[in-house]
Every structure is written in structure tokens, then in C-alpha cells.
């Protein structure tokens, strides 16, 4: 593993690289670090691929701006990072908010995208049940998953920055703006949408989005938000790597384009 910081649109962005081969970018979920989202599957993917793992604005070791966070800005930041690393084109796997960012990269920077895997995304407000919005509206910092807090402070021991990151993430979700149908239809890259059958977004929402994307495959996996990749808040003590859907993702990535 190598790691570093890159000057990206006014912030220093932290990244890690693993393995060799075709580049695959990993974009973590909201409130997370590289390791909380992808720590269990990085060793599996890096056997065959070069991984570029990022930490987004205000998250983990990356810098922040005096602005709200947005999927559009995150997409621009990842695109700039890849340019700085001299990576012309890559496959991209984003989870949760990172999946929204991956799709924004496909919309805003289509030239750098090969294939997109978007896991557990929520692209429209009507895609989640009303109780989700009630939970978000009434949520507090105390309810932030403890593994996220511990992971942030392990790499950035600043409680004030942790609280700022939490608030920015919460505000982005509470004020979620729908991806328009035209935006989703404009995605040119092949896309694999993945969702748990007990996820934030309903299966009906993910099916509807898959029908808008011109070249899209869909996988509904038993389990909750990120259990299919070992996201840290879903981990069971007796988990096995065979529980994760790496072969499904690799098969999608290895399929030849028409």
C-alpha cells in the first residue's frame, strides 16, 4: 500500500493505492473512511487490480472547505485526483453516498469512466420510506455509529472536525436533491446497481433507476446497508469473506464491452 495527499480543488485530498492491474476507484460512504467501508474487501480486489481509494472532503484525513458537501463537488474532486495521478480512465465503485458520487462522475466526467458500480444509492427522495426521513430529521450526533467516530478520530484526532463532518453529512442527506431523470438517462458508462433487500432505498426505487440508465445491470442482495461488502456497521463477528459479492462485481468488470 502507498498513500499520499493531492492538491484537489483547494483541499488536500488523502488517497491510498493497492495492487497492480486495471485501475478501480473506491469511494466510501457518508461519515466513513476508506477502511470502514472497504477494509474487508480491499485485500480481495487488490489481487487482480490497482485500487485507488479516496477520502472525500471533510472525511478522514482529507481537508475541508468552508462550504457544504455535495455529490457534484465530490465527483469533481475525484476526477481531479485521477488527473493528478495520471489515470486517464478507470472503473469506479462507490458505496452509499459514494455511489451517488460515482454516478455524478459518470454524468459530469464521462470521459474518465469505464464501468460504474453504485452500491446502496438513493437518487430521489421518494426512494426511501418516510420513517427514514423522520430518523434523519430528528437524528443527533450521539446516534452516529460509534465505529465511524472511532475510525475518524483514529486518523484525524480532532473532535471539532468530526462534529463538522457529521453535520455536513446529515445536512446533505436531509436536504437531498433528486437526480433528475434526464441526468440518470445521460449516463453512458455501463452501470451495476447493487442494493440490499433491507437497505435505505427500496427495491422499487433501485429497479426504477435501473430502467432509466441506458446500460444497466441490477443486483438485489439479501441483507442490509452494505452487508454485501462487509461495511463495518454490518459486520458479524463470525463473518467470512465468502459472504461478500466480490465475484459478482468482478464478473461485471471483466465482461467485454460491445
Image (tube, rainbow, N blue to C red):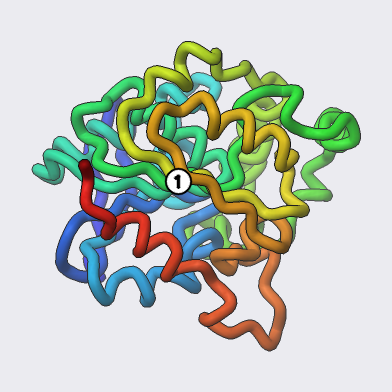
The answer to whether 184 is drawn above or below residue 258 in the figure is: above
Residue drawn at the location 56% of the way across and 56% of the way down: 152
Residue 95 percent location from the top left of the image: 52, 48
Left or right, residue 26 beside residue 28: left
| Res. 179 image quadrant | top right
* Spot occupied by residue 104 in the image (x, y as percentages of width and height): 42, 27
Q: Residue drawn at (15%, 36%), measured in percent from left and top?
A: 83
Residue 51 pos. (x, y %): 27, 60
Farthest residue in the left direction?
86
Is residue 179 or residue 69 the one in the foreground? Answer: 179
Q: Quadrant of the C terminus?
A: top left
> In this image, 64 relative to 255: left or right?
right
Residue at the far front in the pictured view:
258
Vertical placement of residue 94 versus 179, above or below: below
SS assignment at label 1: strand
Which quadrant of the view contains residue 177?
top right
Amino acid at each position: 500500500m502507498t498513500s499520499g495527499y493531492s492538491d484537489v480543488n483547494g483541499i488536500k485530498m488523502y488517497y491510498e493505492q493497492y495492487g497492480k492491474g486495471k485501475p478501480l476507484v473506491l469511494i466510501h460512504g457518508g461519515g466513513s473512511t476508506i477502511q470502514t467501508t472497504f477494509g474487508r474487501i480491499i485485500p480481495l480486489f487488490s489481487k487482480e487490480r490497482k485500487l485507488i481509494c479516496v477520502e472525500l472532503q471533510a472525511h478522514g484525513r482529507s481537508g475541508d472547505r468552508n462550504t457544504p458537501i455535495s455529490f457534484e463537488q465530490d465527483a469533481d474532486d475525484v476526477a481531479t485526483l485521477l488527473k493528478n495521478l495520471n489515470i486517464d480512465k478507470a472503473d469506479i465503485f462507490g458505496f452509499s453516498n459514494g455511489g451517488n458520487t460515482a454516478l455524478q462522475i459518470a454524468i459530469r466526467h464521462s470521459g474518465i469512466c469505464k464501468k460504474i458500480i453504485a452500491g446502496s444509492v438513493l437518487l430521489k427522495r421518494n426512494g426511501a420510506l418516510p420513517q427514514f426521513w423522520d430518523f434523519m430529521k430528528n437524528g443527533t450526533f450521539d446516534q452516529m455509529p460509534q465505529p465511524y467516530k472511532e475510525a475518524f478520530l483514529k486518523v484525524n484526532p480532532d473532535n471539532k472536525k468530526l462534529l463538522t463532518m457529521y453535520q455536513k453529512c446529515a445536512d446533505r442527506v436531509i436536504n437531498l436533491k433528486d437526480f433528475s431523470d434526464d441526468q440518470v438517462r445521460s449516463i453512458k458508462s455501463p452501470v451495476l446497481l447493487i442494493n440490499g433487500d433491507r437497505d435505505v432505498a427500496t427495491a422499487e426505487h433501485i429497479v426504477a433507476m435501473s430502467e432509466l440508465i441506458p446500460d444497466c445491470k441490477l443486483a438485489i442482495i439479501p441483507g442490509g446497508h452494505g452487508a454485501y461488502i462487509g461495511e463495518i456497521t454490518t459486520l458479524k463477528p463470525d463473518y467470512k469473506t465468502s459472504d461478500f459479492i466480490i465475484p459478482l462485481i468482478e464478473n461485471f468488470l471483466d465482461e467485454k464491452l460491445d
